[in-house]
Image (cartoon, rainbow, N blue to C red):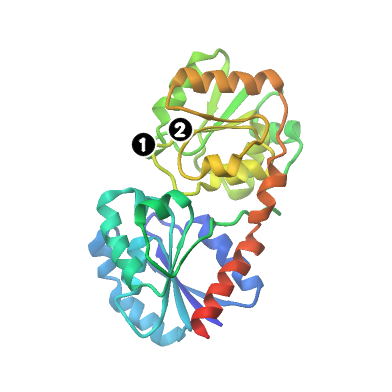
Amino acid sequence: MKVLIVCSKNSGKIAPFILDQAESLTAQGVEIDFFTVQQKGLFGYLKSRKGLVQKIKNFQPDLIHAHYGLSGLLANLQREIPVVTTYHGSDINKRKIRQFSKIAILLSKFNIFVSQKNIAIAKPKQNFALIPCGVDTELFKPMDKIECRTKFGFTNEEKLVLFSSAFNNQVKNPQLAKSAVNVLSDIQLVELKGYSRLQVCELMNSCDAALMTSFTEGSPQFIKEAMAVNCPIVSVDVGDVREMIGDTENCFICNYSETEIAEALQKVFATNKRTLGREKILRLENKIIAGEIIEIYKSIVR
């Protein structure tokens, strides 16, 4: 089976979770190729139609798998090859983009949503499924904390909290994270920016807690990967974080309150224990998710 993945590369790279999923699909016998959108905005996507048509002619896929609503809209500008579109959160949560995602939902042969909250907002009528992106559990695994800290120059005595993104990413609400950490003393908030995938894993093993304060999310990989390495998590109730964490001990869901977040972090430092989050996230291993997606592909191609 030949599948053409249509996605954005206007930030300079393809999102890691899309690459991970493609690699898992390839491992299960799917022939994958990419068409990436280099330009930003709706018109940037629309201008890519000619290139997409040429790519389809050259690759001759059985179907197209588009990631994010605007990619789904672009993919459906041709009607010969069936399209599966995955919506990752921002394309549903942001009202201006949602209107275009809804067009993609109507035109796509099948739609995949990564969180139940996004399904509730989008209100698809038929041909859809809830399938979160998978986790690379071979890469994201528990490692020796002291060894990982040594690689980054951290001492064993430092109290470290890993923020979910770069400090200039306003959707991630860094101001609240900084305010909450400042309530406590001697806590270092580590910015997640400019690291390789392996280094992200090592950082999660280095830090005492993972912190998410985002305004909006779909099904954040940051949380699932933190679960996979047994890192304690403190997060606001956003996206599907509550469902992912469940009743995992030493993980906390908070309101958008610096005091409440600080109290949860203090509990993590007091217990000084890792979690058993990995046990709960193994159901979302990349190979399992890839298998579910392949079944959708087969039902369409058949």
* Residue 8 visible at all: yes
Circle 1: residue type: Gln
Residue at the (76%, 36%) spot, across then down: 144
Q: Which dot, 2 or 1, sits closer to the camera? A: 2
Residue at the (58%, 15%) spot, across then down: 186
- Judge whether 54 appears above or below 47 on screen: below
Q: Quick check: 131 left or right of 271?
A: left
Which quadrant: the N terminus? bottom right
Residue at the (69%, 52%) spot, across then down: 282
Q: Which mark is residue 170?
A: 1
Q: Quick check: 9 left or right of 139?
A: left
- Can you give x and y, in whole percent of width and height, for residue 11 in the image? 39, 54
- Judge whether 6 appears above or below 167 on screen: below
- Can you give x and y, in whole percent of width and height, for residue 30 in the image? 59, 77
- Can you give x and y, in whole percent of width and height, for residue 3 in the image? 50, 77
State the residue in front, 2 or 239.
Answer: 239
Look at the numbered disc 1 and give the secondary structure of its residue. helix
Packing grade of label 1 (10 A; few <14, some 14-19, many >=20) is few
Packing grade of label 2 (10 A; few <14, some 14-19, many >=20) is many
Residue at the (45%, 39%) spot, across then down: 238
Q: Mark 2 — residue?
A: 213
State how far apart marks 2 and 1 are (Cα).
10 Å
Res. 43 image quadrant: bottom left
Look at the numbered disc 2 and give the secondary structure of its residue. loop
Q: Earlier in the sequence, mark 2 or mark 1?
A: 1
Q: Which mark is residue 88?
A: none
Q: Quick check: 284 left or right of 300?
A: right
* Residue 158 visible at all: no
- Can you give x and y, in whole percent of width and height, for residue 257 in the image? 43, 22
